[in-house]
Amino acid sequence: MKKLIIPFLFIACLILTACNHDDEPIMDYYVRYTAIAKPNAVISMSFSNEPGKSEFIQTSMPDGKFQYSVGPVNKGFKANLVVSYDGGGPVEFLSIEVAKGSEPFVLKRSGTKYFDLEYIIE
């Protein structure tokens, strides 16, 4: 009887270990925020940089292009971008792009004359 119990337990352990689906790999994502404003115009920009946190920047660029990337983040991350001219008004263009692992960035949201964009990684 003992000779049957040990192999049976060994096989049961192998089956239970092989059936565990909780070990699915977590894919890292990267988010790129872009804002295009008038050259040398001062803007106020806020964007999500990790779950529940955001970064605020107030600056100007000679070419008017602002681009920031954050990550790695996981599925469910809420990418949020809010941009306006320092004196008020929407900038010319906003976009949120997402890259999965080492794949290229893919445009997820964009708009002209927008104040804000949001995208949740699914």
Image (tube, grey):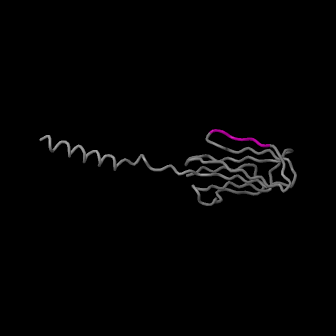
Quarter placement of the N terminus? top left
Q: Residue 88 occupies which quadrant of the picture? A: top right
Residue for point 47% across, 50% down: 25
State how many labels appear.
Answer: 0
Residue toward you, 79 or 69: 69
* Span shown in magenta: 52-57
Percent position of residue 11, x then y = 25, 48
Residue located farthest toward the top when viewing the structure as drawn: 52
Can you say whether 82 is above or below 64 in the image? Answer: above
Residue located farthest toward the left when viewing the structure as drawn: 1
Taking 74 as reference, is 35 left or right? right
Taking 15 as reference, is 25 left or right? right
Residue for point 65% across, 59% down: 107
Percent position of residue 79, x then y = 64, 48
Q: Which secondary structure is most common in the magenta stretch?
A: strand
Residue for point 66% across, 49% down: 118
Percent position of residue 51, x then y = 61, 41
Q: Is residue 114 magenta?
A: no
Percent position of residue 14, x then y = 29, 48
Residue toward you, 9 or 64: 9
